[in-house]
Image (cartoon, rainbow, N blue to C red):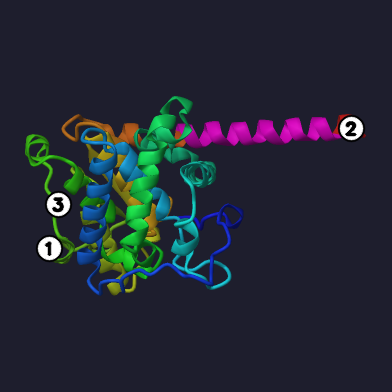
Amino acid sequence: MPSSPKKKTPPCSSTHPRKRPVPLVNAEMHARKIAEAVESAWHGAYGSGRFDVPLSVIATLAALPQKDSHGHDAADAASEWTADEFVDYARHTWRSITRARPETIHLLYPLIAWIFDDAETSVHPHAHAVAQAALRAGQPDLTGTDRRFDTDLLGNVLMVLRPKSALQAQGQFYTPADISKLIAQMVGLDGSSDVLEPMMGTGGMLRAAAEVMREEGRDPRSVRWVGCDIDEIAVACATVNSMIWGLGSDIVFYGGNALTLGWEGRALAQREHLRQVAAGVERSRKLLALIAATQRQ
């Protein structure tokens, strides 16, 4: 994901650094630990129900590096944020991301809409509680380093948050990273220019395919990633994951039924339409700025 804006990161307190457990060597175990901490904090503060808020908190914290520009632990600084400061950071982060990747706005919307909704201020303290729990569990040591390539943290969080009955009803099951990698190796990519996953969930198989590509000396950004899932929250998580895992910008994701004919074409058309709209808005913004500058002269 794009680096977090420096001006939104408060100075780190170096005199009394926050003590945090040494990160687990196994990325999957670490992801599970973070997921359990998130589940406990969210259900303890808010109760059961919606998943968009805790998932978006984890997605937001994924923009934090392990160390800030001065070499201090970024989690130490973030742990000092108030609820309002965390939401300000989240808004700034997602404005930057959607400005850089406007074609992902409709995919990310189910996950981040609450961040920009003034009617959602009541959940800010609960989101803050989740952020603090994830920081205590060492999330920046996972998503702020190359270890982020080795696991699907958002997938782990979603599986822990959702009741087992709901997962079974939707046919959702989390495939461990080592199993996903084994499947990717068995299937083989054969130098193809597209990687297709019609039931992608949060993108675990895409992550495994990217891992195999890297081991073979191929750049995951050199291919097109095409995916579909009927669960829009899962699609939003997969979109964030594509940034966490460095899959590049050639992402064609679709929220809907993969059995519907032509979904790939509709997803691609929607992506290109949003890119054209964003380009038009940017041209208009520059034109208005030029007019304003001319009037001031």
- Of the 4 image quadrants, the one containing the N terminus is bottom left
Q: Residue at x 30, y 47 (%)?
A: 238
Judging from the image, what secondary structure is the residue with disc 3 in? loop
Q: 10 Å neighbourhood of mark 3: few (<14), some, or many (≥20)? A: some
Which amino acid does the dot numbered 1 rest on? Ile
Q: Which mark lies nearer to you, 3 or 1?
A: 3
- Amino acid at the residue labelled 2: Arg
Q: Which residue is mark 1?
A: 179
**Is residue 155 toward the left or the right of residue 20 in the image?**
left
Q: Is residue 264 visible?
A: no
User: Which residue is denoted by mark 3 in the rendering?
Assistant: 174
Residue appearing at x 37%, y 50% in the figure: 131
Quadrant housing residue 115: top left
| Closer-to-camera residue (297/11) | 11
Q: CA distance from mark 2 to mark 1?
A: 63 Å
Find out whether the residues at labels 2 and 1 contact each other: C-beta distance under 8 Å: no
C-alpha separation, residue under disc 3 versus residue under disc 2: 58 Å
Viewer-closest of 14 and 120: 14
Mark 2 or mark 3, which is nearer the start of the sequence? 3
- x then y, percent, for residue 81: 49, 51
* Magenta region, residue range: 273-293
**Is 277 inside the magenta-drawn segment?**
yes
